[in-house]
Amino acid sequence: STLKLPNPRESNHINMSPNAALTDAVIPPGVVTGENLMKLMEHARDNGYAIPAVNCTSSSTVNAALEAAAKNNSPVMIQASIGGGQFVAGKIIKDPQAPHAGSGAPASHVR
């Protein structure tokens, strides 16, 4: 199965969602990197829609973001911030590398 990216310009009605109509741009499902990421970003730019970035601080927020994207057949970026990474690692941990380790946990969960 692949994600067929929409082309809102081909729609006969106004729709702010990237799902207004399908296009030939095909991106494999799952974590997108490299050339496929560039195709995805170019498609969004060329068709005037944004890809949301959700700052995730737990596997629950990752799951919620991925579920919402799947229900809407829409791409989503899972974002990890320093503050979010510190929250995942535990605020009591004072090691300066803790936020980086905490940010890695949601990334591993997505993969």
Image (cartoon, rainbow, N blue to C red):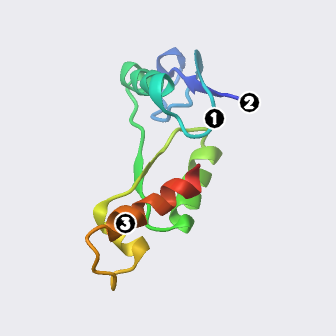
Q: CA distance from mark 2 to mark 1?
A: 7 Å
Q: Which label sits in the foreground, 2 or 3?
A: 3
Q: Are marks 2 and 1 in contact (CB under 8 Å)?
A: yes
Q: Position of residue 101 (x, y in %)?
A: 40, 64
Asked if residue 72 is positioned above or below residue 33 in the image, the reply reads below
Q: Which label sits in the foreground, 1 or 3?
A: 3
Tell me the tag on residue 29.
Answer: 1
Tell me if 68 is positioned left or right of 38 in this view: right
Q: Are marks 1 and 3 in contact (CB under 8 Å)?
A: no
Q: CA distance from mark 2 to mark 3?
A: 32 Å
> Who is closer to the viewer here, 29 or 102?
102
Q: What kind of residue is marked 2?
A: Ser
Residue 51 seen anywhere in this rendered image of the structure: yes
Tell me the tag on residue 69.
Answer: none
Q: What kind of residue is marked 1?
A: Pro
Q: Secondary structure at mark 2?
A: loop
- For disc 3, the marked residue is 85
Q: What kind of residue is marked 3?
A: Gly
Sequence-earlier tag: 1 or 3: 1
Q: Residue furthest right?
A: 1
Q: CA distance from mark 1 to mark 3?
A: 25 Å
- For disc 2, the marked residue is 1
Q: Which residue is located at x 44 percent, y 61 percent?
A: 56
Asked if residue 11 is positioned above or below residue 104 in the image, the reply reads above
